[in-house]
């Protein structure tokens, strides 16, 4: 009942004040339309860029310089890049690019810094840039200039960092080369002083030579023992105490040919000993010397027999003389051979002792040599790494590398972002309704106050009239 009465009262009030309320609502709508007509439109353009690692670079250093920070880093590369986009360097370069196309464009770096907005798209490496301006084409061009300047500044920063790395490596290169030269000289000097070429090869050669010398020593010892026994038996048969005895001197000592042959045999034995030690027993040169010695021995024995035939002696001596001559000649030959074998055995023993000493020295020399080799290898590796990094730094410096990739050109807006036609009209309608309602309440309140005042005045007038009537009657 009350609700129906309230609605009826409201409708009655609306009918009474419909003209005023209509004017108020219409004025509000007209004000909204006038605002739309007077306010210049603003167009909002947007562009996107992706922050990525420079995988297209051919150098490891270039990839390292363009590598994004890992999850453990304290800084967010997207947040850092968004701040760099709004930096003075990027915006000033973008403004200079715009001045080439729009010389009269009234935009300062500070205005660009305030109006260029950067938003990080969640869960991506993408940044969205937006800019609002009265001309949609200019708004898009401003964002294109900002994106282009951002990529250029980013690439220049990478190249500048590569340049600093290159300069540092170029300063370190002479030092590393000097370290390698010093290490190589120290190793070479140690090898020269100690006669080392290759420890492994030298040890193998020493072991082989030592084995050969030991075998030769055993053979010489056996031959020397056999020759010693033959000389002893010939000494007993001939009665000669030594090769240089008077008997030999009488028979052969006065003959120059025999002496020459003996000297040749002695020299030949020395050559055989030296060649056997140096070349080995199977070498053709040694075999030729042995054949030459055999021929000289035969010639020597033949010369002794010729001299012995010319000596005058008794018949019995003459009968026995050829046998005696052969025995003495054999004794002399075996004596020379014995001395040669003895000398060769001494030489072999000396060489074997030297090889034993050399083998014992090698383990002692291997430790400092290994240390020098490690130092030289470390210097070589450091120099190679330095040269490789220097080459990569030069490549990274020369390449146009950036980890900013624009995702297309800025979008040219077709509709203004401000003022919003529908929003302004809706707000105008809502405001008109609220103003009309407020005006209705105000008018109703004024009418109610006016009616109350008139009723009170009538009541007061009636009371006064009634009092006057009572006074008259009295």
Image (cartoon, rainbow, N blue to C red):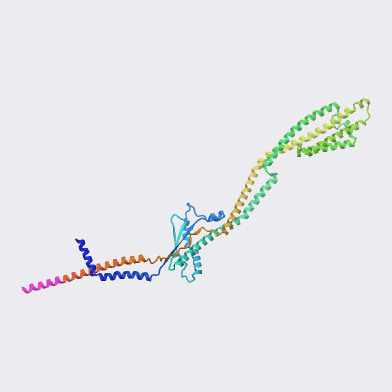
Residue 320 sits in quarter: top right
The residue located at (76%, 31%) in the rendering is 221
Q: Taking 301 as reference, is 133 above or below it?
A: below
In the rendered view of the protein, which quadrant contains the C terminus?
Answer: bottom left
Residue 202 included in the magenta stretch of the image: no
Q: Going by the image, does 61 lie left or right of 428? A: right
Secondary structure mostly seen in magenta is helix
Judging depth in this view, the residue of 279 and 335 nearest the camera is 279
Judging depth in this view, the residue of 205 and 340 nearest the camera is 205
Q: Going by the image, does 371 lie left or right of 114? A: right
| Residue 83 visible here | yes
Q: How many marks?
A: 0
The residue located at (70%, 45%) in the rendering is 193
Q: Taking 352 as reference, is 449 above or below it?
A: below
**Horizontal and vertical percent position of residue 80:** 47, 58
Judging depth in this view, the residue of 170 and 295 nearest the camera is 295
| Residue 249 visible here | no
Residue found at the very far top of the displayed protein: 316
Judging depth in this view, the residue of 406 and 104 nearest the camera is 406
In the rendered view of the protein, which quadrant contains the N terminus?
Answer: bottom left
The residue located at (65%, 42%) in the rendering is 366
**Horizontal and vertical percent position of residue 401:** 54, 58
Q: Going by the image, does 183 lie left or right of 344? A: left
Residue found at the very far front of the displayed protein: 414
Residue found at the very far bottom of the displayed protein: 472
Residue 468 included in the magenta stretch of the image: yes
**Horizontal and vertical percent position of residue 54:** 53, 56
Q: Which residues are magenta?
A: 458-474
The residue located at (81%, 34%) in the rendering is 339
**Horizontal and vertical percent position of residue 361:** 68, 40
């Amino acid at each position: 009942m009350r609700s129906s009465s309230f609605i009826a009262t409201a409708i009655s009030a609306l009918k009474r004040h419909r003209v005023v309320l209509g004017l108020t609502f219409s004025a509000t709508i007209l004000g909204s339309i006038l605002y739309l007509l007077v306010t210049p439109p603003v167009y909002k353009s947007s562009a996107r860029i992706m922050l990525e690692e420079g995988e297209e670079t051919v150098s490891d250093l270039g990839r390292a310089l363009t590598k994004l920070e890992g999850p453990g880093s304290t800084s967010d590369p997207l947040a850092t890049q968004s701040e760099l986009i709004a930096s003075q360097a990027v915006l000033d370069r973008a403004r200079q690019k715009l001045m080439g196309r729009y010389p009269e464009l009234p935009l300062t770096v500070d205005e660009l810094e305030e109006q260029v907005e950067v938003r990080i798209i969640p869960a991506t490496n993408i940044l969205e840039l937006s800019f609002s301006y009265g001309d949609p084409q200019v708004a898009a061009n401003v964002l294109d200039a900002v994106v282009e300047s951002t990529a250029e500044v980013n690439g220049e920063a990478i190249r500048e960092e590569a340049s600093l790395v290159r300069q540092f490596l170029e300063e370190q290169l002479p030092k590393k080369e000097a370290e390698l030269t010093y290490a190589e000289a120290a190793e070479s000097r140690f090898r020269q002083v100690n006669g080392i070429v290759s420890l492994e090869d030298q040890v193998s050669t020493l072991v082989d030579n030592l084995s050969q010398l030991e075998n030769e020593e055993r053979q010489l010892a056996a031959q020397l023992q056999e020759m010693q026994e033959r000389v002893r038996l010939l000494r007993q048969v001939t009665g000669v105490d030594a090769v240089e005895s008077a008997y030999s001197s009488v028979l052969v000592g006065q003959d120059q040919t025999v002496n020459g042959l003996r000297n040749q045999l002695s020299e030949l034995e020395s050559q055989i000993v030296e060649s056997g030690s140096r070349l080995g027993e199977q070498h053709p040169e040694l075999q030729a010397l042995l054949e030459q010695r055999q021929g000289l021995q035969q010639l020597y024995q033949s010369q002794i027999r010729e001299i012995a035939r010319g000596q005058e002696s008794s018949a019995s001596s003459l009968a026995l003389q050829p046998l005696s001559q052969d025995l003495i000649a054999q004794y002399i030959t075996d004596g020379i051979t014995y001395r040669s074998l003895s000398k060769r055995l001494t030489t072999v023993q000396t060489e074997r002792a030297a090889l034993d000493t050399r083998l014992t020295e090698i383990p002692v020399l291997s430790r400092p040599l290994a240390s020098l080799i490690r130092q030289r290898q470390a210097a070589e590796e450091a120099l190679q790494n330095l040269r490789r990094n220097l080459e990569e730094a030069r490549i990274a410096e020369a390449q146009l590398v950036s980890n900013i990739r624009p995702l297309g050109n800025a979008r040219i807006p077709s509709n203004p972002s401000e003022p919003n036609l529908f929003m302004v009209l809706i707000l105008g309608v809502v405001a008109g309704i609220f103003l009309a309602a407020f005006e209705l309440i105000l008018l109703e309140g004024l009418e109610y106050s006016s009616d109350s005042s008139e009723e009170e005045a009538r009541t007061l007038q009636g009371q006064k009239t009634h009092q006057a009537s009572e006074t008259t009657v009295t």
